[in-house]
Each structure stands twice: as C-alpha cells, then as structure tokens.
Amino acid sequence: MAELLPLMVSALVLGLLGGGHCLGMCGGLMGALTMATPQDQRGKRLRFLIAYNLGRVLSYASAGLLIGLAGWAVANSPAAMALRVVAALLLISMGLYLAGWWSGLTRIEALGRGLWRHIQPFASRLMPVRSIPRALLLGALWGWLPCGLVYSTLLWAASQGDALDSALLMLAFGIGTWPVLLATGLAAERLTAVLRKRGVRVLGGITVILFGVWTLPGPHQQWLMGHGSGPTQQAPAHLHH
C-alpha cells in the first residue's frame, strides 16, 4: 500500500490538472443540474452535484477495474512494455492538448462514441434531475462519455499490472476532478476563471507531459532516481518530491 500512495497522489494531480478539460465535457451538465433547483436551495443543489460526481467517479473506478484486469493479464508478458509506452504517449498527447499545442488526442475520443450512443438516451431520460438517486445514476452513466483525458489515465492505470490498483488510481483521478466541476456547478466564477487562464493551462499541460516522459520505460528513470530500485513503482514518488 505504501508503494501505491505516490501513484494515487499522481492520479489525483492528473485529475486536478485536467480539470479544465472537464469544464468542456461536463460543465454544461453542471449548470443544468443546478438550474433544476431554486437559487435559495443551495444545500439541495450541492447534494445533487455531489451525487452526480460520486456516480461519475465510481464509473471511472469501475472502468479502471475492468481495464486493470487486462493490464494484469499482460503484466508478465512482452506486451506489458508496449502497454506502458502507449500509456506514456497518451499522457504526453494529453499534456499537449491541455496546453493548447495539439488537439490530435480528440480523435481517440471517437473510439468510445459507439458505446456512448447506446448510453446517452438513458442519461437523457434522467433529466431534469429531481432527486439524489437520479443525480447519482446520471453521473454513473455520464462517466462513460468519451474523453481523451480519461482514456489516457485509464491506460496509465492499467499499465501498473494490478486490477485493484488500477481501480484505486482511477478513483483518485476522479476525485481530483471534483474541485473544478463542483466550482462550476456552484457558479464559483473566480475559480473557474483562474483555471481557464492560458498560463494555468500551459503549466498543467507541461506537468502532464513531464509525467508522460517519466512514465516511458528507460534508463532515464534510474538515472533521475540516483539508485537501482525498480523504476516502475518508484518513479511517480520522485516526481512529486
């Protein structure tokens, strides 16, 4: 568990840095959730938002468990190295996207559109949201919306080679996206304005790019670590020291 903690911190940071991307994917829905309740019922609005985001994060964890099983299956095979390389390249692509330097990652989102076409009608029937269970279910369904940020993090989580670890990492990633989406839903314009600033997006993008480079297998990990312990488990810990 001690070895997993730095990875979970990394996943949390990825979710926080990628929060600006979440504004475009879920920001409109956050507004729709809060419009369903009167302005003077702030407590009820907050409960709806928490229920929705809880459902969304649980979907991420479920996806992490499923794809983590695939990662576990190839953990001790030659394909494990290829999986880690792909995960690193996706993280680098996500960083370029967050910084506004390259939007090619959005094409990957097309891979999930077939599944989303089947889920979206059920999600639409839950709106307008009038109860906590409906908000929770809506979030659980909306968590499967095609998203390059989620796909990148999923592959990175799966590359750890353990299904439970993958689920926990996706849970931490989802929790990292909470501040942005809660702020949007509660009309916290000051916070969302900061996160939309060009400099903040570039800084977040560069950080994710560096994390992707760090994830790539190679001698650079041991060189940066300065000792001979396994790079896969220890790399993220050094990144955040």
Image: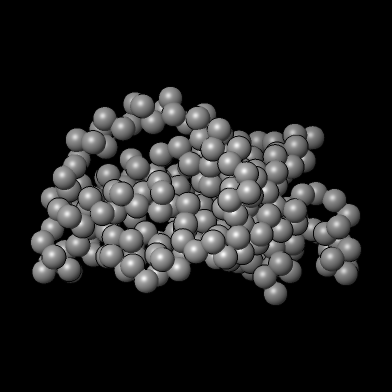
Pick the quarter of the image with the N terminus: bottom right
Question: Residue at the spot x=66%, y=59% of the render?
Answer: 206
State the image coordinates of residue 226 (x, y, percent, origin top left).
88, 69
Colour mapping: one colour
Q: Position of residue 172 (x, y in %)?
A: 50, 59
Q: Residue furthest bottom?
A: 241
Q: Is residue 80 visible?
A: no
In the picture provided, is 86 more to the left or to the right than 10? right
Q: Is residue 54 left or right of residue 10?
A: left
From what the image shows, is residue 137 above or below residue 125? below
Q: Is residue 48 left or right of 214 when viewed as pictured? A: left
Q: Nearer the viewer, residue 11 or 204?
A: 204
Q: Is residue 177 above or below residue 120?
A: below
Q: Which image quadrant for residue 225? A: bottom right
User: Is any atom of residue 219 visible in this view?
Assistant: yes
* Residue occupying the point 29% across, 60% down: 185
Q: Residue at x 53, y 47 (%)?
A: 149
Could you tell me how many numbered marks the image carries?
0
x, y percentage for residue 29?
29, 48
Quadrant housing the C terminus = bottom right
Q: Is residue 95 above or below residue 178?
A: above
Residue occupying the far front of the picture: 198
Residue 69: % across, % down: 58, 39
Q: Look at 74% across and 62% down and name the residue there.
A: 235
**Viewer-nearest residue: 48 or 193:** 193
Whether residue 151 is situated above or below residue 233 in the rendered picture? above
